[in-house]
Image (cartoon, rainbow, N blue to C red):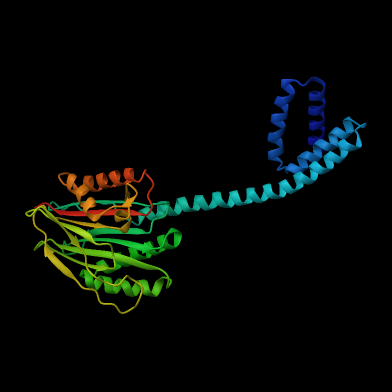
Amino acid sequence: MKVSMYQLYKEMLTSYLENQSEHALYHAQQFSKQMMEQDMSPEETVSLHISVFQELKDDLSQEVIDSFDLLLEVMIGYGLAYREHQSLRDRQQRLESELDVAARMQKTLLPHNDLKMDQIDLGVISVPASKMSGDYYHYGTDDSGNVIVAVADVIGKGVPAALSMSMIKYAVDTLTEKEFQPASLLESLNRVVHRNIDEDMFITMMYGLYDSTDHTFYYASAGHEPGFVYDASEDTFDNLEAKGLVLGVSPKVSYKESSFSLKENDFVVLLSDGVTECRVDGEFIERAQLVDIIRRHQHLTAQEIVDQVYQELEKAQEFQLKDDFTLLILRRKV
């Protein structure tokens, strides 16, 4: 022990034994701060007390001395466990800090700009169940003025899923520059995924392209959750689905492309399985229930619709998401 700490503690203990004053207790609190600054362990603190007390009271009974020996042994064990706990806590704090940075960086991978197209109304919301998300969405336009939309879901969670999502983002950005149709893009993307991710990780995706010249919506799916299409003239919702193998299973996969005319006020709904796996009254939400929620808000803008759907489902789950939640709506206005 440092002499200064020994002398300080001796003076403090002497004062307290003589007066039992509040002032002495205040000095004890200040002394504890100095102990922390000098990184004194619990057993060092107990040893300090024993040494000082034995100097002040040289007539201690053998029982008291033996009790000090036992206390010191207890505190040695406690000190080892305490230091291990501190080390684990420090590592946890560093990890949390790194995850916070990674989560902020991950958000920058997602598009945030408005489409700025008079004929299109687009809304999207994506909320991770934890800090890192395995969901990915994409929207934008190609050189021909076609609108591109996509929602993907990495089968897995945490940092590996987030890293896979970043790979998908850059691959999609590169491939969409070549004006791929949905089926062709998924085939090219599948080869990228197969080469670059582990065998036990897969990615699902629904990819769509809206041709702004003839108002046709083309789409293809790689094992992704079916979406919806709303027909304004019939006031009906139909499933938007297509069969296709998830990305990354095999390097040689063909995807089927489908299409339909998107008329005025029609809209397309793309989503991740975190939406359909929301629970209402303890049960997974039925697709019909999800349609009912969308229908209640369909008079709003696309962004307001997705926001309202999320708020209702989040509330139904007592504000605890079980999975990443992504919902995208593309509506033709004129």
Which residue is at the far left?
233
Residue 94 lies, in percent from the top left, at: 54, 51
Q: Is residue 247 left or right of residue 84?
A: left
Q: Is residue 265 above or below residue 253?
A: above
Residue 125 lies, in percent from the top left, at: 29, 50
Which residue is located at x 83 percent, y 39 percent? 68
| Numbered-mark total | 0
Quadrant placement of the N terminus: top right
Residue 77 lies, in percent from the top left, at: 74, 48
Residue 1 visible in rendering: no
Nearer-the-camera pick, 227 or 31: 227
Which residue is located at x 59 percent, y 49 percent? 89
Q: Is residue 38 above or below residue 271?
A: above
Q: Is residue 136 above or below residue 66?
A: below
Q: Is residue 267 above or below residue 8?
A: below
User: Toward which corner of the image does residue 192 lie, by quadrant?
Assistant: bottom left
Q: Is residue 83 left or right of residue 172?
A: right
